[in-house]
Amino acid sequence: MLKHVLRTLLVVCAFIGITSCSSDSNETPEAQTLLKMEFKVVPDNIQVKEYKKLTLSFKELNSGFTITKELSNTNTLQVSLPSGTYQMIAEGNIVYSDPSGSIEAKVAGVQNGVVINGNEINKTIELSLKAGNSSDLILEEIFFTGTRTPQGAMYFGDQYFKITNNTDKTLYADGMLLIQSSFMTNEKQDYSPNIMGTTLSAGAIIRIPGTGNTYPVKPGESIIIAEDAINHKDFNPSSVNLSTANFQIFKENSDDIDNPAVPKMINVSDKMVIHNQGYYAYALARMPQGMTNEALVAQNSYTYTYNLSFGGDIYPMDGTAVKIPNEWITDVVNLSVQDSFQWLVTSPSLDMGWTSVTSFDGDKNRFGKSVRRKIIGKTMEGKNILKDTNNSTADFDHGVKPSLFN
């Protein structure tokens, strides 16, 4: 018995200089692979002076076997892992050089679906600087699926975004950008140049109007941005009344619904069409003070290329997007469908995970469900405190009843 216990401990904790480890499985597979890892901060112009501390976690996606490791003053690691398919997450602190001196910053990186097998394998995880401003507005809820009528027909136009002040001070929504990613989470391509480490590639961009102090949002309060700001229950009793939404998405030069009583979002780039299965990332961002919509697009246009593989043939493709610097972004949520998710379309420094409503494409049970942030407590005033760790997998309840349907 003692021999069996010792043997299990030796296999599970097969790190060099390991500090902590844990496993969700009772038995560890015999086959082991030596993984040699290097951690690299992107973009390349960041001159790292010191890797102060890194925490690495490895999770085998089939068995649930997990193990963690803490590193100090090094960007390399050797570890023996049971063969399998892993999610690898790295988070920590670095010190890098800047014209103003040395700066300490948080970094993060993630790789999904990494196959580990054979005797030895080499991998590099790219680390990006943590961005965002947790003291600003966040996306509390995204209702993107639409609903069904009592007769079973699909009904759209009742989608909405719920944006919340999760701080203890009054914030102003004026000028906030709501961004839909250009790339899709269920379609991974080798886009060139790859600028994801420093920017978000935006497709549609809309902006909240206001002069700077027009739309205050008090602590714990929210604003609603509706696809169509009407009482949808007049057309579908299974839907919701959005006629009192704070803002509406209005697509100019199209047959769109306009509620004169609800302010329109300002269209900055492209037309925002909310996919009823997710498949995109959505972000909140603030432009530098004084920047115009026209300057945003003109100064940040991004042309990319990639090779589309279809039916055994390769087709050269290209496209354009608007580059949104990561440091402008206050919050990001990656959306997808569980069985078709391929990658995060934002830097892991913005969002370490993703969330969904359903497990498979075309699920008819997805209608009338949303993704909503978890509530982790209450303020002294009774307002909800929302979970916000820059990891949508951990932060969101998925496939739940939309809050406005209560």
Image (tube, grey):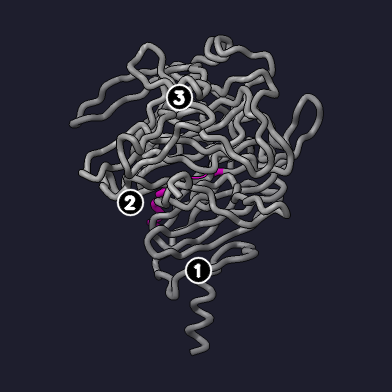
Earlier along the polypeptide chain: callout 2 or callout 1? 1
What crowding class fits label 3: few (fewer than 14 Cα within 10 Å), some (14-19), or many (20 or more)? many
Q: Is residue 45 above or below residue 350?
A: above
Q: Is residue 117 magenta?
A: yes
Of residue 303 and residue 255, the one placed in the foreground of this image is: 255
**Residue type for callout 3:** Ile
Q: Which mark is residue 359?
A: 2
Find out whether residue 168 is within the magenta segment.
no
Q: Position of residue 108 (x, y in %)?
A: 59, 43
What residue does disc 1 label?
Answer: 23
Residue 80 seen in the current view: yes
The residue that disc 3 covers is 249
| Residue 85, horizontal then vertical, whole percent | 39, 55
Residue drawn where x is 41% and y is 30% of the image: 230
**Three-letter code, disc 1:** Ser
Q: Which residues are magenta?
A: 109-118
Q: Secondary structure at mark 3?
A: loop
Hey, what amino acid is under mark 2?
Ser
Mark 3 or mark 1: name the one nearer the start of the chain: 1
- Left or right? Give the position of 73 relative to 268: right
